[in-house]
C-alpha cells in the first residue's frame, strides 16, 4: 500500500473496508493486493491454483484455475 492522498483520506475518515478496493485499482502507484500477487504466481506456474486459493483473501478468484 502506498500512502496516496486517497488512501490517507480513507484512513482519516476510518473507512478501512474501502482501502482494499483502492489497493486493487492502485497499480499505477505500485500497489498490489495479495490476491493479485498470488494470481501472478499461478500464471507463472510457481504455485498451484489450489495453493493460492487456500491462502487468498477472495478465494473465488482461483475457482476456475483450480479446476483446470
Image (cartoon, rainbow, N blue to C red):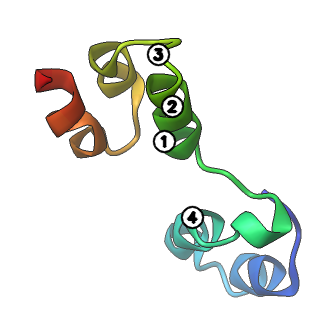
Vertical placement of 49 versus 39: above or below? above
In the visual, does 30 lie left or right of 58? right
- Identify the residue position indicated by label 1 in the image: 35
The one nearer the camera, 25 or 20, is 25
Q: Position of residue 58 (x, y in %)?
A: 33, 45
Choose the circle earlier in sequence order: 4 or 3: 4
Q: Secondary structure at mark 2?
A: helix
Q: Residue at x 74, y 75 (%)?
A: 11
Q: CA distance from mark 4 to mark 3?
A: 22 Å
**Residue at the farthest left position:** 67
Q: Are marks 4 and 2 in contact (CB under 8 Å)?
A: no
Q: Nearer the viewer, mark 2 or mark 3?
A: 3
Figure quadrant of the C terminus = top left
Choose the circle earlier in sequence order: 2 or 3: 2
Q: Are marks 2 and 1 in contact (CB under 8 Å)?
A: yes
Q: Are marks 3 and 1 in contact (CB under 8 Å)?
A: no
Amino acid at each position: 500500500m502506498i500512502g496516496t492522498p486517497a488512501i490517507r483520506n480513507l484512513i482519516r475518515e476510518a473507512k478501512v473496508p474501502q482501502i482494499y478496493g483502492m489497493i486493487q485499482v492502485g497499480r499505477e502507484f505500485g500497489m498490489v493486493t495479495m490476491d493479485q500477487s498470488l494470481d501472478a504466481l499461478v500464471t507463472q506456474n510457481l504455485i498451484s491454483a489450489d495453493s493460492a486459493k487456500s491462502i487468498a483473501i477472495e478465494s473465488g478468484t482461483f475457482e476456475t484455475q483450480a479446476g483446470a
